[in-house]
Image (cartoon, rainbow, N blue to C red):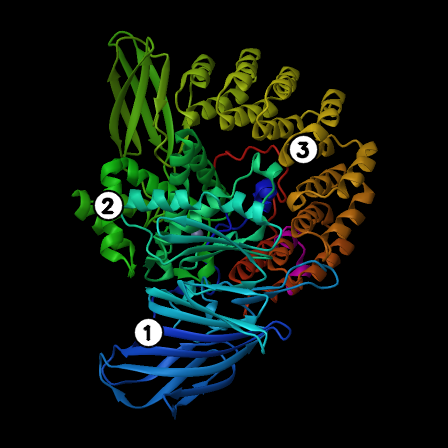
Amino acid sequence: MTDRHTVTEFFHCRAQAGQSFDGRFALAGSTPHYAPDRTFDTRHIRLELALDFARQSLTGTATVTLQAIQEGAQAMVFDAVDFQNLRVRSGPTSLRFDYDRRKLTLHWPKPIRRGTSVEVTIGYRVTKPKLGLHFIGPDRHYPTKPVQAWTQGEDEYNRYWFPCHDAPQERATTETILTVPQRFTAVSNGALVRQTHNRSARTRTFHWKQNVPHSPYLVSLAVGEFTKLEDRWKNVPVLYFCQPGREADAQRAFGKTPKMIDFFSRRLGVPYAYAKYSQVAAVDFIYGGMENTSSTTQTALTLHDERAHLDFSSDPLVAHELAHQWFGDLVTCKDWSHAWLNESFATYFEALFKEYDMGPDEFMYELRGNAEAYFDEDRERYRRPLVTRFYKNTNDLFDRHLYEKGSLILHMIRRQLGDADWWRSMNLYLKRHRTQNVETLDLINAIQDATGKNLRPFFDQWVYKGGHPEYKVRFWWDARVKKAFVRVLQTQGVNEETPLFSMPVTFAFTVRGQEKRFTEKVDKKDQLLSFALLAAPELVLVDPGHVILKKIDILKPESMWIYQLTQDPHVLGRIDAAKALATFGSPTAVQALRQALVKEKFWGVQSSIAGALGRSGSSAAMEALLDGLRQVSNPKVRRAIYEALGNYPSPRVLSEARAQYESEKSYFAEAEAIRTLGRLRDPSLLGLFKSLLLRESWNDVIRCAAIDAIASLHIAESVGLLKEYSRYGHHPNARMTAIRRLGALGRGREDIQAHLVSLLKDPYLLVQIAVVKTLGSFADERVTEALLKYTQGDLDGRLKRAAEEAVRKIRKGMDPEFPQEKGKDRGAKR
Ligand SMILES: [Zn+2]
């Protein structure tokens, strides 16, 4: 599962960064969580289902084969929320049952011997399920929206539409037999056994069968009027389902899937395990994607046109969900406290595919982005161990630690082992545990058995504790003894949660153009190291391969940073140099950045250079950016240049951005130019921005930029426009942009507050979450009552967490910096 790639994040991540919190991961009411006891093992689930779109209901018969684990077991408990018309039997015999609207308990007439299998059949109906099964369709405000139904089982939502022992450790084979109106296609897990057409009833029935046991949360349905695109990997059908008219966009979004399946299968030494692989583009999906076994659901927002494809790709999303087919589906965490064995792996393997497909620079740049996402959470919300049992709602765990930090931990493991041992470990771990559930210890043992290396000390620091090393490094050259001295301090506050880290750290010295490397164990609070060299080094690098997840404070002279900016072969070293040079701001530093902006080969470094020039603040830096705008064509860099130019409110910038925005090849570069125009705060541009509100573009990229620009003007008319675009009926991206922007303007304004409170009841979950977060930024007691309603009950876990954090934030009256203005240095120290 991921929300890393919901399309809105690409242009709103900066505005989201300022969620300040009080530093505690565990919400009030948190308890330790363990996998539940089991009396029976679920062996097989057969679901016969009929969907009624008009009533938003599902009529089902679940036939479940159970094997007794406990001797003499008699009661079988199923999770089943708000089921109606329950009928329970075994063969022809009715079974006695109790039902409290959440748990269904069946009573077998006599004790069952351990190991004996029984079959029970549960007839039921669910109507307008609160979670798990979502019906999508047109209404007065969205008349062209297609009719679809899809499910979202993770973390514990499938219990809202079929009876199951809803825990990851419960693995079973499944069959889904779905009857839908004849114009629809129904997609589910496994192979399509048969498809039948009932002409008189005008229905179609799709019979899917998943022969590889999987966890209940991975069972899925997706139903709609779909076009099917067929691809292949070896003999495995690779299918893409989208609404008619989006075929080319679907091919563009999903087209690399066979290449990814091939890469993962070969590198892991474990071929793709399922009968087919399908991806359905689901409208109004509430995540970026969900890795249902062999049957992934993706947000339809990821489908994109040719213009978007210039600088937007669905590959990371596609690779993430595909990687889960091994890590998460074939091998599944035993309980959610070990969910990093699902999510960190999917996040890291998404990056590994990028490394394979696009090279090491893109790979390392993605890992840097992951590190920054984790550092933001660590700084602004909380710190926690990667594995923890102590939480309130399962969804609390699905955070930037679980995805991004975990991916960086896996990267360190790979580098410590070396590639051969890394892949050998992955292979053994998967082969040993395929179709089983795992805990972190299973990974440690697999690595040890595959390589002889005992990584327990590493796991104790990085997985079972929180934080990361913060190194303070100072170095000097002693010409008399021909030695470089390096003093390394670990400045992180060491406590029960955050350890003093013990890591091998590499130091690289370039002397007369030749690099020499030394690796030393750094494990003390304060260490002095010395290295014999031929002469004073031109460049000193700590961790030149950028392996360790760390913060580093290192003092280097300007000349050395300039040397690093141009000579460091590692993209992240050049990025660090660009950032450091921004703080010098001297004419030489700006001149070096100006040259590197156009000469640098990798766009990610160029973007960082643009950001550095944006922070420099001098007119020379502005000139350098304008020069870059004339010479650099990569749209991702142009975005960064526009963003940086937003820090220079001048007629020159205004006329350049105004002259160029329309001819930008990329939506995103054009959007950034528009945002920059807004940040120049010239009220005479309102007419232009209003006209841009009417422009149609992919996923409302241009409209969102116009909304941002209007909000930046800070004029009275802005509020009415923002309210208008936040209303039900507009594209969700436009709505969420307007809502966040109202947050910035709304403090102390009761009309805005009342408007946002009215949006809490919105039918679209992601809009609700945006509203909750925005209200949390108001620090106004009066909205807490409205927010408290969203902290409990049958609601999405992300909404509950957001509401609870918002209430806590308001009560503590803490809101230093929401929403964050652009250009703030996200790399600031904790
Ligand atoms: Zn995921």
Residue 383 within the magenta-colored segment of the rendering: no
- Amino acid at circle 1: Thr
- SS for callout 1: strand
Amino acid at the residue labelled 3: Glu
Residue 737: % across, % down: 67, 47
Task: Report the amino acid beneath label 2.
Answer: Ser
Residue drawn 24% across and 53% down? 431
Cα–Cα span, label 3 and label 2? 46 Å
Q: Is mark 3 within 8 Å of ligand 1?
A: no
Q: Quadrant of residue 717?
A: top right
Badge 1 crowding class, 10 Å Cα cut-off, few under 14, some 14 to 19, many 20 or more, is: many
Distance in Å between CA atoms under marks 2 and 1? 30 Å
In the depicted structure, whether residue 426 falls above or below residue 517:
below
- Kindly identify which residue carries mark 3: 670
What is the x, y in percent for residue 195?
A: 47, 68
Residue at figure coordinates x 70%, y 58% from the top left: 144
Residue at left offset 68%, top offset 24% = 648
Position above or below: 41 against 494: below
Work out whether mark 3 precedes mark 2 in sequence or the reverse, and give the earlier one. 2
Q: Nearer the viewer, residue 56 or 678?
A: 56
Is residue 164 among the parts visible in the rendering? no
The yes-or-no answer for disc 1 within 8 Å of ligand 1 is no
Q: Residue 137 at x, y = what percent? A: 65, 64
Question: What residue range appears in magenta?
Answer: 773-785
Q: Nearer the viewer, residue 775 or 830?
A: 775
> In the rendered picture of this protein, how many numbered marks are placed on residues?
3
Instruction: Say which label, 2 or 1, has the lower sequence index.
Output: 1
Q: Residues within 10 Å of mark 3 (few under 14, many from 20)?
A: many
Q: Which residue is mark 2?
A: 425
Cα distance between the residues tagged 3 and 1: 54 Å
Q: Which residue is mark 1?
A: 42
Residue 781 on the magenta span: yes
